[in-house]
Image (tube, helix red, strand yellow):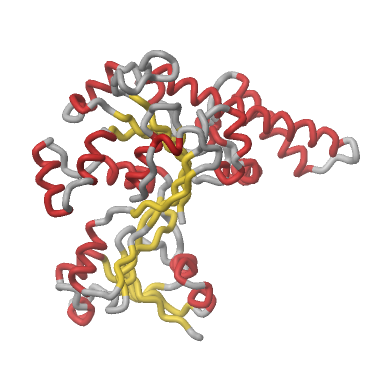
Amino acid sequence: MLHAGLIGFPSSGKTTLFHLLTGTTGPAPLTAGRQDPLVGVAQVPDERLDQLTALFDPRKHVPATVELTELAGHGGTAALLDVSGFRQADALLHVLRLFEDNRVPHAAGSVNPARDGQQMEDELILADLAVAERRIDRIRQDLKKGKKQELLEEQRVVEACRGALEEGRPLRALDLAPEDHRRLRGFSFLSAKPLLVVLNLDEADVATPEAAIAQAGLSTVLSGAGVEAVPVCAKIELEIAELPPDERGAFLGDLGLADSGLARVIRASYGLLGYISFFTVGKDECRAWSIPRGTPAQEAAREIHSDIARGFIRAEVVPYDALTARDGSLPACREHGEVRLEGKEYEVQDGDVINFRFAT
C-alpha cells in the first residue's frame, strides 16, 4: 500500500481534509491538542474498476488504496523528527490555506500561502540537514578505523545533500545517479519525497483556481521538481460528503466541476509517485492493484501473493479497453486475438486485466 503524509499549519484545513479523504469523522475540538498522528486509508477512485464491477457483478469490489498519516501538532521540525512512521511516507501532501475566514484565524495572523509554503519547505530542509550532519559525523568516525570505498561514496553523496540543504534547496530537486539514490534510501529524507500541494481555496475561487493561485504568489513554491498542486475547497467537499451519492454529480455540475477535489487529490498522489493500476476480475472480486510503472509481470504477481510469483508460468493479459468493448467476455477477446500470454519480464501496463498462471 502507498503511504502519504499529510502536513500543514494550524487552521489550514488539513484535519478536515484527512477525515474527508479517509471517510472518517472527528470533531475539531478533540483533535486540536492531540499529539499522536491520525492514520486512515483513502480509496483511489477509478472508473475502470467501477465498469469492470458492473460487468462481472462480483461479491467484492476492492479499489486501490493510499494510507494517509496526518501529523499532529503544528508541523514544526521537532514534530517531524519525532514521528518515525511519517518518514516512511512515499510522498508528502501539504495542505496550504488560501481561504479567508474571520471565524478561523490564521496562527500567523494573516493568510499568506507563499509564506506558509516556503516556511514548511524550510522546516523539511532543516529536519533533513540535522540527519545529514549526524550521518557525516558518524561516517568520519568510521573512516578513522579504515577506509572503505562504499563509505567514501556515501560520504560524497551525503555531503552533496548537506550542501544543497545549506543552500535552502530541497533534496527532491537534486539530479542524483541511481546508485546515489540507493545510498540515500535508508535516510528517508523528508525534502526528497515528492510533494503534492493541496490548495485549500475560498468557495468563491473554486471555478477559477488558476487566478487564485497566481494572486497568492505561489509560482515559486509550485515550480520545483517533484512538486504538483491540486486545488480543493474543504467547505464544498464537506457539503458534497453530506449529500446522497446520487445527488453529488448534479451538485458538482452546478459548480462547473467534473469531479470532487478529494478524487483529484488521491489520483494526483497516486500519479505523483509514478504508480499505475492493473486489475484482476471474476465473480469473487474485481480488484485494482498498485504497482510502480515499469514493474515486470512476476513482481506484479507478488502483489497478489508470493506463491503466485514463485510459481509464475505466464500472465494472461487483456487490455481494459478491449475487455470492456467485449462486455467483459474473455472468450470473445480470445476469438479476436486480444488476449496475450506474457512472460515474467513483461512490463505491466496501466489498465491491464491479468490472470496469472502459476504452478503450486
Q: Measured along the vertical axis of the image, is residue 100 above or below residue 38?
A: above
Q: Residue furthest bottom?
A: 360
Query: Residue at horizontal 29%, vertical 23%?
Result: 99
Label tally = 0
Q: Nearer the viewer, residue 261 or 36?
A: 36
Q: Measured along the vertical axis of the image, is residue 272 above or below residue 210?
A: below
Q: Residue furthest front?
A: 29
Query: Residue at horizontal 36%, vertical 49%?
Result: 24
Q: Is residue 321 left or right of residue 175?
A: left
Q: Residue furthest top?
A: 109
Query: Residue at horizontal 59%, vertical 28%?
Result: 77
Where residue 318 appears, as percent x and y from the top left, is 28, 70
Q: Nearer the viewer, residue 28 or 196?
A: 28
Query: Residue at horizontal 21%, vertical 74%?
Result: 57
Where residue 63 appears, as percent x and y from the top left, is 33, 61
Where residue 350 appears, as percent x and y from the top left, is 33, 58
Q: Measured along the vertical axis of the image, is residue 35 above or below residue 111?
A: below
Q: Is residue 162 left or right of residue 238?
A: right
Q: Quadrant of residue 153?
A: top right
Q: Measured along the vertical axis of the image, is residue 273 above or below residue 292?
A: above
Where residue 329 appears, as percent x and y from the top left, is 19, 77
